[in-house]
Image: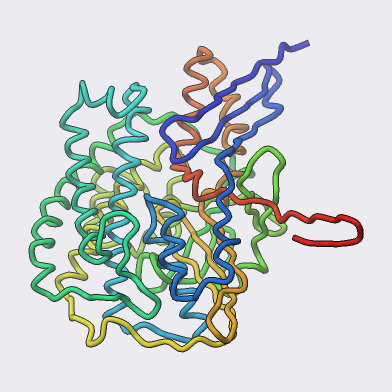
Amino acid sequence: MAKSKTIKVDYLARVEGEGALYIRYDDGGVHDVKLKIFEPPRFFEGFMRGRDYLEAPDITARICGICPVAYQMSALHAMEDALGLVPTPELSALRRLIYCGEWIESHTLHIYMLHAPDFLGYPSAVAMAKDHPKIVQVGLQIKKAGNAIVKLLGGREIHPINVRVGGFYRVPAASELKPLREQLLQARDMAAETVRWAASLPFPKFERSAEDQYEFVALSHSQEYPMNKGRIASTRGLDIPVSEYDSHFREEHVEYTNALHSVLVERGAYFVGPMARYNLNYDRLSPLVRQTAEDIGFPPFCANPFQSIVVRSLEVLYAFDEALRIIDGYQQPQEPYLNTEPRASTGCAATEAPRGLLYHRYSIDERGKITDAKIVPPTSQNQKTIEDDLRHMLPKFLHLPEDKLQAQCEQAIRNYDPCISCSTHFLQLHLERSGRVGQ
């Protein structure tokens, strides 16, 4: 009889939030994989109820300190969908610009501080910095430029406060964008270097067989690389408006984790994030980014999740390119925001957070009070795929010493840049006592 072994990581390092990993396997294969997310439930959907609809972008921004813009964007677009409000092209451009800042901030943090140590053999970015100080310094400079975008448009670098339903509380004058443009130009050159550096890292060889291929899911748009708008598309033919999300996706509770698992109805696990966006929208990247990918020999379709660091670096380069394009064509909106009047209605929206598709749905009453809220973060959607990766990957790496095998498993999780704090939910609790039923 084959002797059973376990890989047990009580606290995953270099991920946002608190999670653990448990794998039981033997020479015959992998028998159990559990990505355990034990970050306490945060009840955001619950305590949104009863709050004013205008508060939603500011409250949901507190869900995450790394991708607050994504939560603001999904919330305000959902509210505007409920109210039938369409932002002007000028306001839409500013929203895309602040989203560029967040992609730069978040992706650069992951590339340099969380993921690079895996490839270079260090336990942390601090340890890596002793031998590779220039690499870390470049990462910090690039991230600083992303911070500058978010601060200018959002009022501060983390948990921005200048975004509102209908637009912004304040929009910048063209003269305020000029100093930012110079900073972005310099950082774009560093981002291009980052792509070449990331492509030179040693990647584990891992691709699934044809019958077990991923279903990549992302927004797709006919004219732009998706950030704030688009249809939901997949590599297996899904092509739906965001309004049909609830008909095609379902959340499930799993007993060992506080985060719900999201699945595609009838098909199960799917994959969201930079690789999904890239694989579904390569033609929408700017010529500079496509040329850079071609120069390093990186294909338009990538199915090795360990190469997600290259895709993220290409998206950082794109975010700089796109931010400069928006700044060069900037026309200050005549009004910072469009006025809104509440009405009883339901609206939904999906945007592309750095880690992938982020879905929000809200119902409000005639006074504008939120009566129901649903938020599906990217990490919830990737959990099943992460666990499936470990099942597929482990047999290929069983020849490694146990400490290296464990490190490989942890790296496989970090491929997805999981944001555990964003993903925690809690069950609806039904109490029944002496004939009384409550929630």
User: Residue 71, image x and y in percent?
Assistant: 44, 61
Displayed quadrant of residue 72? bottom left
Q: Residue shown at 31%/42% (left/top)? A: 109
Left or right for 362, reference 60: right
Instruction: Pick the residue in front: 236 or 41.
Output: 41
Instruction: Pick the residue in front: 152 or 174.
Output: 152
User: Residue 317, image x and y in percent?
Assistant: 25, 53
Above or below 7: residue 363: below
Look at the image and tell me in which quarter the N terminus lies.
top right
Q: Residue shown at 49%/46% (left/top)? A: 421
Q: Residue shown at 19%/81% (left/top)? A: 332
Q: Residue shown at 28%/74% (left/top)? A: 93
User: Residue 23, image x and y in percent?
Assistant: 63, 26
Q: How is the image coloured?
A: rainbow
Instruction: Pick the residue in front: 92 or 256.
Output: 256
Above or below 34: residue 234: below
Seen from this angle, which residue lies furthest front?
434
User: Residue 434, image x and y in percent?
Assistant: 91, 57
Seen from this angle, which residue lies furthest right?
435
Look at the image and tell me in which quarter the C terminus lies.
bottom right
Displayed quadrant of residue 135? top left
